[in-house]
Amino acid sequence: MAPEDGTGNADAGALPGSIYDTAERTLLREQVQRFVAREIEPRADAWERQGSVPREVLRRMGELGWLGLMTPEAFGGADVDAVTNYVYAEALSQSTHGGFVVTVLVHTDMASPHLVHAGTDEQKRRWLPGVVRGEVLTAVAVTEADAGSDVARIRTSAKRDGDSFVLDGSKMFITNGVNADLFFVAARTAPLEAGARGISMFCVERGTPGFRVGQVLDKSGWRSSDTAELVFDGCRIPASQMLGAENQGFFALMKNFQRERLALAAMAIGNAQSALGLALAHVKGRSAFGGVLWDRQAIRQQLASLHARTEAARSFALHCAWLSAQGRECVREMSELKALCGELANDVAYACQQFHGGMGYIRDTAIERLWRDARILAIGGGATEVMLEEAAKRL
Ligand SMILES: Cc1cc2nc3c(=O)[nH]c(=O)nc-3n(C[C@H](O)[C@H](O)[C@H](O)COP(=O)(O)OP(=O)(O)OC[C@H]3O[C@@H](n4cnc5c(N)ncnc54)[C@H](O)[C@@H]3O)c2cc1C
């Protein structure tokens, strides 16, 4: 089970005999794993230091057809189903550089799907081809300093003025916030008392007067992902840039939550697979007490247990992807999956770092980065507690 591909992933190319495996998915997984091993892992330490992923990497991924896998073919996408997309996201997430992974998956699975689902034909024709090619990087801006888990409490306003809307307010923790070209912004089009029924979505381009990047946020992990505060100060956009129907924005967000949660679960599973691969290779080679660490039953059994939990989570993730591909109701399953995987990635990363000893605490070793990058997976895109509430409501 030694890592062979530089990602630390011991199970690269696994799923033998899985009912979810097809020739197309196997090929895609292998292509993505090769890309990660050759083009990401050797270069991404520099991106961690600079705090962003170079645009040429995203353009290259666009050329490979990976930035619009679920986008309709008419707009340059591949129109694959949620299972194939999950296979892609998991393989990408086996990179030990979570900042790179989230830059891509926010663009493909959390931001641009809003345009695919709710965009008018004109909006789609204007932006989607560039999105798929990696020329138009996207972000989704919902969270505010005073409203994160409780999305219905956002205060950024969008007031109608003739043929325009004028946006005022600010957004917090926005991934791709510094470098995105197109932002899907949730803003209030009815008073706060209207709660979830008073939110609409808008397309806002970088460079629009009255819109600027505020603070660039310095994070513990995901360091190659740029995260920012966004400020809207009398930002006027044409009314034609409203995305979807007025006051239906919250429901549009909810519609994409399942895809977002699945992508975050893929990130967590990829992170755990890589951490396990690195730990297995380490303990099998590390001499101690007249043998290697692997000879210690306590270590072996803990790694076997974490491996079993990761495999179980992965099977559940594939099942959730399949439910989604069938168009079935799966809010409870996806919420459970996100809660489960966010915590699992942290358990796995913690133990695998422990087995690396002092080296596991040295900055920018792969295992140290995986441990740092795992932390946000239990917080962002719906904290574990919030996901469990969503699940509990449906039990
Ligand atoms: C690196 C990073 C990237 C992000 N990217 C984006 C992005 O691209 N776009 C975007 O819109 N947002 C983004 N976010 C925001 C992220 O989704 C929120 O941080 C997250 O939803 C939690 O919201 P909050 O930070 O306001 O925490 P709060 O809502 O204040 O919650 C704090 C904590 O309280 C607990 N809690 C909350 N509600 C409950 C409950 N009902 N029951 C029990 N416990 C509860 C949880 O432990 C939670 O972590 C990002 C955040 C980070 C850190």
Image (cartoon, helix red, strand yellow):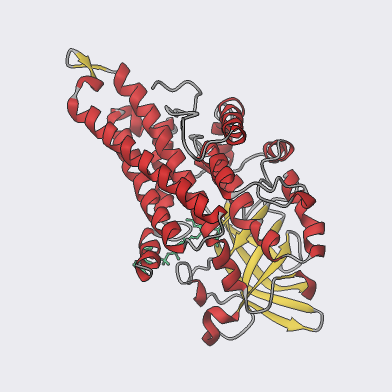
**Residue 23: quarter of image:** top right
Residue 188 rendering spot, x and y as whole percentages = 61, 78
Question: Would you place residue 177 above or below residue 283 in this image?
Answer: below
The count of marks equals 0
- Ligand 1, by image quadrant, is bottom left
Question: Would you place residue 48 above or below residue 71 in this image?
Answer: above
Q: Is residue 353 left or right of residue 299?
A: right
Q: Is residue 327 left or right of residue 391?
A: right
Is residue 184 visible in the rendered image? The answer is: yes
**Residue 78: quarter of image:** top right
In which quadrant will I find the C terminus? bottom left
Q: Is residue 366 left or right of residue 22?
A: left
Check the image and name the residue furthest to the top: 290
**Residue 369: quarter of image:** top left
- Identify which residue, 135 or 262, lies in the foreground: 262
Residue 278 rendering spot, x and y as whole percentages = 39, 27
